[in-house]
Image (cartoon, grey):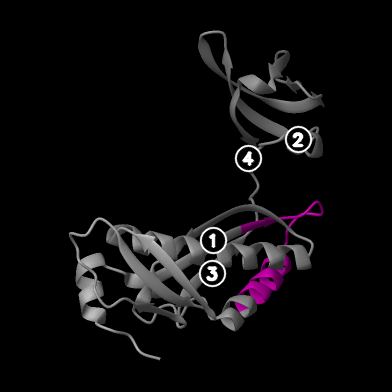
């Protein structure tokens, strides 16, 4: 396979992903004019020829979106196969300096061995798919002072110490205490002085507070 006039593409639309960082991604287009309102591109993307019609400056983003979708699919597939939940992830795909950060979760907690097992499976899937020529993979747990984001989180961590920032009329307040009760609308926090009822709709952010 060949790359045609790659220097012109690099100069005019700065497609970093196509500089052998995606081993199977090759750009074909005989006449890109930087002043043209729309251009036609055809890319060979991991076994598929995909025609794209867009402005030159948008082409890199379209390729990047497709790549992120494929990487995210492997992130989720690895978690499902090992019975983990994806707590958070970030994909910073920049060619040879790509970074993938994933925080995994489990109802039984996350140990170092869990992170190692997930890292091994995801690395193998990424390498088999040849999506990235080089990358840094960081796998971790949500941490001791993890965020509380759903009703299920509050129920799961009943009787645990928490810090909740919430709106109370026109004021923003912070309450620290133990999660004592949870229903579909309200969490009750036992502070040192009193019980505080906080509607979920008023919560700005919350986390465990060990």
Disc with the residue nearer the chain's start (2 vs 3):
3
In contact (CB < 8 Å): disc 1 and disc 2: no
Foreground label between 4 and 1: 1
Q: Position of residue 171 (x, y in %)?
A: 51, 11
Q: Which label was assigned to residue 172? A: none
Q: Is residue 79 left or right of residue 102?
A: right
User: To which quarter of the image does residue 58 belong?
Assistant: bottom left
Q: Residue at x 67, y 37 (%)?
A: 148
Let me know if residue 110 is in the magenta part. Answer: yes
Query: In the rendered structure, are the residues bearing label 4 and label 1 in contact, judged by CB atoms less than 8 Å apart?
Result: no
Q: SS class of the residue under badge 1?
A: strand
Looking at the picture, how far across and down is residue 102, in whole percent?
Answer: 59, 60
- The stretch in magenta equals 103-123
State the residue lying farthest toward the top: 169
Give me the C-alpha separation between circle 3 and circle 4: 22 Å
Residue nearest the observer in this picture, 119 or 98: 98
Marked residue nearer the N-terminal end (1 or 2): 1
Contact flag, marks 2 and 3 (Cβ < 8 Å): no
Tell me the number on the disc at residue 160: 2
Distance between the Cα atoms at labels 2 and 4?
13 Å
Q: Which mark is residue 137?
A: 3
Residue plotted at (55% across, 17% down): 173
Is residue 158 inside the magenta stretch?
no
Screen quadrant of the N terminus: bottom left
In the picture, residue 62 is in which quadrant? Answer: bottom left
Look at mark 1 in the image and give the residue it sits on.
101
Q: Note whether 210 is above or below 40 in the view shown.
A: above
User: Callout 4: helix, strand or loop?
Assistant: loop
């Amino acid at each position: 396979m060949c790359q045609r006039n790659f220097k012109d593409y690099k100069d005019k639309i700065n497609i970093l992903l196509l500089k052998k960082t995606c081993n199977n991604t090759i750009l074909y287009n005989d006449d890109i004019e930087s002043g043209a309102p729309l251009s036609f591109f055809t890319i060979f993307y991991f076994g598929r020829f995909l025609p794209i019609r867009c402005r030159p400056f948008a082409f890199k983003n379209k390729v990047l979106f497709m790549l992120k979708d494929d990487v995210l699919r492997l992130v989720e597939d690895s978690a499902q196969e090992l019975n983990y939940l994806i707590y958070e992830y970030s994909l910073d795909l920049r060619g040879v300096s790509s970074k993938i950060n994933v925080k995994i979760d489990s109802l039984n907690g996350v140990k170092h061995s869990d992170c190692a097992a997930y890292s091994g499976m995801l690395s193998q899937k990424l390498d088999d798919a040849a999506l990235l020529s080089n990358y840094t993979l960081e796998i971790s747990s949500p941490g001791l002072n993890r965020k509380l984001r759903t009703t299920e989180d509050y129920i799961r961590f009943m009787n645990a110490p928490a810090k909740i920032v919430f709106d109370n009329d026109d004021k923003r307040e912070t309450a620290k205490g133990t999660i004592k009760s949870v229903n579909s609308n309200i969490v009750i926090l036992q502070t040192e002085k009193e019980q505080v009822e906080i509607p979920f709709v008023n919560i700005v952010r919350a986390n465990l507070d060990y």
